[in-house]
Amino acid sequence: MKSRRRIYEGKAKILYEGPEPGTLVQFFKDDATAFNNKKHEVVDGKGVLNNRISEFVFGHLNNIGIPTHFIKRLNMREQLIKEVEIIPLEVVVRNIAAGSLAKRLGIEEGEVLPRSIIEFYYKNDVLDDPMVSEEHVTAFGWASPQEIDDMMALAIRINDFLSGIFLGVGIQLVDFKIEFGRHWENDTMRVILADEISPDSCRLWDIETKDKLDKDRFRRDMGGMLEAYRDVAQRLGILTENEPVKGTGPRLVK
Ligand code: TMP
């Protein structure tokens, strides 16, 4: 394979220079990490599934007028995307109490929240991505008040759209994490959705059994992560029953 410039490597993805200025190639790795890399395994085939699931979601979001960085899928593991300046925030949207919210506020997991809640976390591995308020975001200049408004409005539209898509295939969208970037077109900048949306970044529960179909299977040592991701892909009609996404089971990475 011809060599190309690696722009950035994260825990689950690599960004390479794209074929044209203003584009990048986003590569989905098989690495699964949790607790800021303290837990790390390679799950063969996870990258392929996340690439396909994220393509499905971002493609639909583009089609309903929610601007995203996604241009097209290139192959099993790569997408062509627009280059953006990532806003250093993780935006979490919650519909049902789970994870850190349930723990922090002593709410039972599974309780439906009185309304959807949006939270901001400052993207900083050294600090373990601390939760921050809008006050922190504007005071430290991570995003402007207008950008916060834009991110929140987009987050709500994305939540409504995704909740419907998943409900249609018997899955509850409990919560999810998204990231945004600044994209310049000529002289105008707008905030667009970046990164990925996949079972790595969402909590997805089977509506009947409440089975977890997301990365909590890995975080909580439940096993069956790849099978769960494949189930999500199949329900969404992305993978046909027999399409092989090979997996030899998780391997511990030291
Ligand atoms: P939390 O309950 O652990 O705060 O997670 C909220 C949502 O954000 C959940 O869907 C998982 C997702 N998430 C990520 O995508 N990356 C992360 O680093 C963390 C902590 C959560």
Image (cartoon, rainbow, N blue to C red):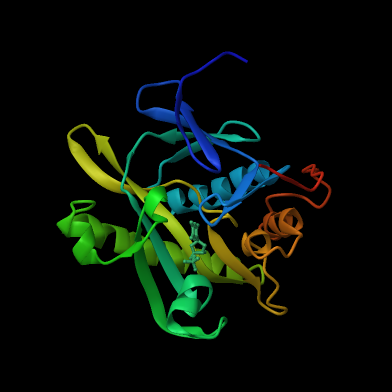
Residue lying furthest top: 2
Q: Look at the picture and state if 138 lies above or below 242.
A: below
Question: Picture quarter containing residue 237?
Answer: bottom right
Asked if residue 85 lies left or right of residue 109, the reply is left
Residue 194, given in percent of the width and then of the height, sits at 41, 46
Question: Picture quarter containing residue 114?
Answer: bottom left
Residue 160, given in percent of the width and then of the height, sits at 45, 69
How many callouts does the rendering have?
0
Point 45% across, 46% down: residue: 195
Q: Look at the picture and state if 191 lies above or below 115.
A: above
Q: Look at the picture and state if 161 lies above or below 107.
A: above
Point 60% across, 57% down: residue: 199
Point 84% across, 48% down: residue: 242
Asked if residue 234 lies left or right of residue 26, the reply is right
Q: If the image is split into quadrants, where does the N terminus sit?
A: top right
Q: Look at the picture and state if 96 lies above or below 250.
A: below
Point 38% across, 74% down: residue: 117
Asked if residue 181 lies left or right of residue 207, the reply is left
Q: If the image is split into quadrants, where does the C terminus sit?
A: top right
Can the viewer see residue 121?
yes
Residue 107, given in percent of the width and then of the height, sits at 49, 85
Of 191 and 142, nearer the camera is 142
Residue 140, given in percent of the width and then of the height, sits at 18, 54
Asked if residue 127 lies left or right of residue 75, the reply is left
Can the viewer see residue 65?
no
Residue lying furthest front: 254
Of 114 and 10, nearer the camera is 10
